[in-house]
Amino acid sequence: MENLQTQGISLPQLGLGTFRMQGDACRAAVESALGLGYRHIDTAEMYGNEEAIGEAIAAAKVARKDLHVTTKVWHENLAPDAIRKAFDASLNKLRLDHVDLYLVHWPSKTMKLPAVFETLMRLKEEGRTRAIGVANFTTALLKTVVEDIKAPIACNQIEYHAMLDQTPVRKYLAAKSIPLVAYCPLAQGRFATDETLAKIGRKHDATAAQVALKWLLDQRGVAAIPKASRAESQQANLDALKLRLDDDDRKAIAALRKDMRCVNPGFAPAWD
């Protein structure tokens, strides 16, 4: 598996998303993924599963230096003191002395970006997170963070998949050599019934989901964190790395609808 190099960290291109995984089921899923060879685990304080993930990491006994763990601060906790409190709680639940990447989960209309990133950069300087970044940031917000504040962000984690065009933000990130981490890379299971993707899959003895995942991972500077609770699904996602899509496949995928946004809460920013 390829790793993306960004701000001093090595980010495995395929990770395990854990949104809506809870308790023992979450612990079992993370233990399974680590057993299969996953080394990138993505969580957030809002998911309510950091404790279960901490238990799984402790049980798996993977060398800490070989493991990448991302967690995130919720948009309601973006004042400096609240960020620190949230970070301490996350680290405690994960049973770690540091995380590899700490993200602002969603922008907030009331956040003061300079103060937010001053706090995050201090956590990085203290060695408690190896890198910092953002999620769900638009091009305009990225410009403020990267060009005005000059924060060393290691990624922007956004919804991105074969049926959602993210060209403006993707081009900006590429120009700044900042990785894009794609969540909902399989459109929350909607690709399983798409005939175009299924047809490409039949050609390669693969599933529609594997085709969609490999399409993402073939893009320079893009990582993906599909949620997969069953070992079979986790292995299928790993197996997608072996696929070889051709120009005809890419043309067919380019012709798919590009306006299917799966995650759009009321507090979301005005998207690009």
Image (cartoon, rainbow, N blue to C red):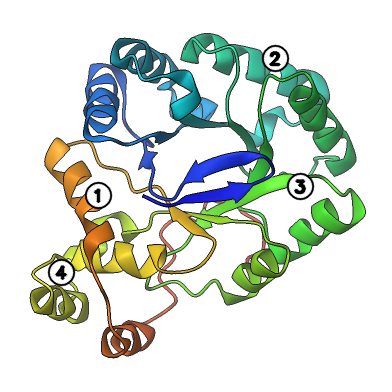
Q: Is residue 152 above or below residue 124?
A: below
244 left or right of 143 in image: left
The answer, for residue 79, to whether it is visible in the render is: no
Structural crowding at the residue carrying mark 3, measured as other residues with C-alpha within 10 Å and reported as few (<14), some (14–19) or many (≥20): few
Q: Earlier in the sequence, mark 4 or mark 2?
A: 2
88 left or right of 55 in image: right
Distance from the alpha carbon under mark 4 to that under mark 3: 37 Å
Task: Name which residue type carries label 1.
Answer: Leu
Residue to which mark 3 is pinned: 109
Q: Earlier in the sequence, mark 1 or mark 3?
A: 3
Q: Position of residue 212 (x, y in %)?
A: 29, 67
Please tell me which residue is depicted at 55% across the width and 9% down the height of the picture.
Answer: 92
Task: Name which residue type carries label 2.
Answer: Lys
Distance from the alpha carbon under mark 4 to that under mark 2: 43 Å
Residue to which mark 1 is pinned: 238
- Name the element at disc 3: loop
Pointers 1 and 4 in contact (C-beta within 8 Å): no
> Quadrant location of the C terminus?
bottom right
Q: Nearer the viewer, residue 5 or 70?
A: 5
Q: Position of residue 194 (x, y in %)?
A: 19, 74
Pointers 2 and 1 in contact (C-beta within 8 Å): no
Residue to which mark 2 is pinned: 85
Task: Name which residue type carries label 4.
Answer: Thr
Structural crowding at the residue carrying mark 1, measured as other residues with C-alpha within 10 Å and reported as few (<14), some (14–19) or many (≥20): many
Distance from the alpha carbon under mark 2 to that under mark 1: 36 Å
Distance from the alpha carbon under mark 1 to that under mark 3: 38 Å
- Name the element at disc 2: helix
Q: Earlier in the sequence, mark 4 or mark 3?
A: 3
Q: Position of residue 95 (x, y in %)?
A: 49, 9
272 left or right of 61 in image: right
95 left or right of 123 in image: left
Q: Position of residue 193 (x, y in %)?
A: 15, 69
